[in-house]
Amino acid sequence: LDYAQEREQFGRPIGDFQAIQHKLADMHTEAEAARNLTYKSAWSVDHADGQLTKLASMAKEFASRTAVKNANECVQIHGGSGYVDDFDAERFYRDAKITQIYEGTTEIQKMIIARELQGKGF
Ligand SMILES: Cc1cc2nc3c(=O)[nH]c(=O)nc-3n(C[C@H](O)[C@H](O)[C@H](O)COP(=O)(O)OP(=O)(O)OC[C@H]3O[C@@H](n4cnc5c(N)ncnc54)[C@H](O)[C@@H]3O)c2cc1C
């Protein structure tokens, strides 16, 4: 967000271009959705509603997917500077990617969600 407002191309901040604005809007919306899914699974712990296994896997899968997508868009918004190590963007991308692998890979989270939906348990 800061870089989009500082970096100028074609005589204006890149944050004035609609393509960049759409990225920022999607990133913010999806991060908020991931946060709310995480809070919903915490709510499920407190209320013992029987949905926790499914909700926790949904939160983990969606939040890690969102982290990777947002870190990728962060690199893109920084252009070449995002790819090299001038900024933290490339490190955020690597840090985000591991969340789709450890503590249950994306594929395994989806298996859990599907089995819970089908009433098969895991
Ligand atoms: C930096 C780092 C830190 C880690 N920290 C810890 C830690 O603190 N504690 C710990 O216990 N482990 C830790 N791990 C290990 C981590 O949990 C495993 O890497 C992870 O569980 C995936 O296992 P794997 O690497 O053997 O991949 P594999 O099991 O070989 O999986 C490879 C791919 O196949 C897919 N796959 C595997 N089985 C299935 C299936 N049945 N159906 C569909 N797809 C499948 C996976 O989703 C993945 O995409 C860490 C790993 C890293 C890289």
Image: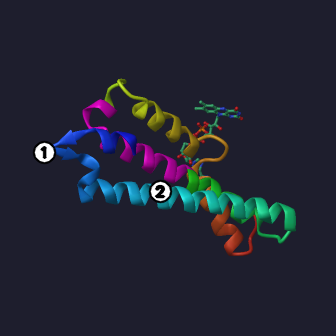
Choose between 11 and 35: the one closer to the eye. Answer: 11
**Residue 33: image location, x then y, percent:** 56, 62
Image quadrant occupied by the C terminus = bottom right
With 93 as the anchor, is 47 left or right in this view?
right
Q: Amino acid at mark 1?
A: Phe
Instruction: Tell me if residue 90 comes above or below residue 21 in the rendering.
Output: above
Where disc 1 sits, the SS reads: loop
Queried whether the magenta region covers residue 80, the answer comes back as: yes
Query: Is any part of residue 58 visible from this angle?
Result: no
Q: Secondary structure at mark 2?
A: helix
Q: What residue is shown with label 2? A: 28
- The type of residue carrying mark 2 is His
Q: What stretch of residues is rendered in magenta?
A: 64-82
Question: Distance between the Cα atoms at labels 2 and 1?
Answer: 26 Å
Q: Residue at x 63, y 68 (%)?
A: 114
Residue at point 74%, 71% (across, down): 120
| Percent position of residue 32, x then y | 56, 59
Mark 2 or mark 1: whose residue is earlier in sequence: 1
Q: Which residue is mark 1?
A: 10
Name the quadrant where ligand 1 sits.
Answer: top right
Q: Position of residue 44 (x, y in %)?
A: 79, 65
Q: Main secondary structure of the magenta part?
A: helix
Other residues around mark 1 within 10 Å, as few (<14) / some (14–19) / many (≥20): few
**Residue 111: percent from the left, percent from the top?**
63, 61
User: Which of the numbered marks, if any, corresponds to residue 55?
Assistant: none
Give the residue drawn at x 41%, y 60%.
26
Nearer-the-camera pick, 57 or 87: 87
Q: Residue furthest left?
A: 10
Q: Going 32% across and 44% down the picture, which residue do you hit?
A: 5
Graded by Cα atoms within 10 Å as few (under 14), some (14 to 19) or many (20 or more), the crowding at tag 2 reads some
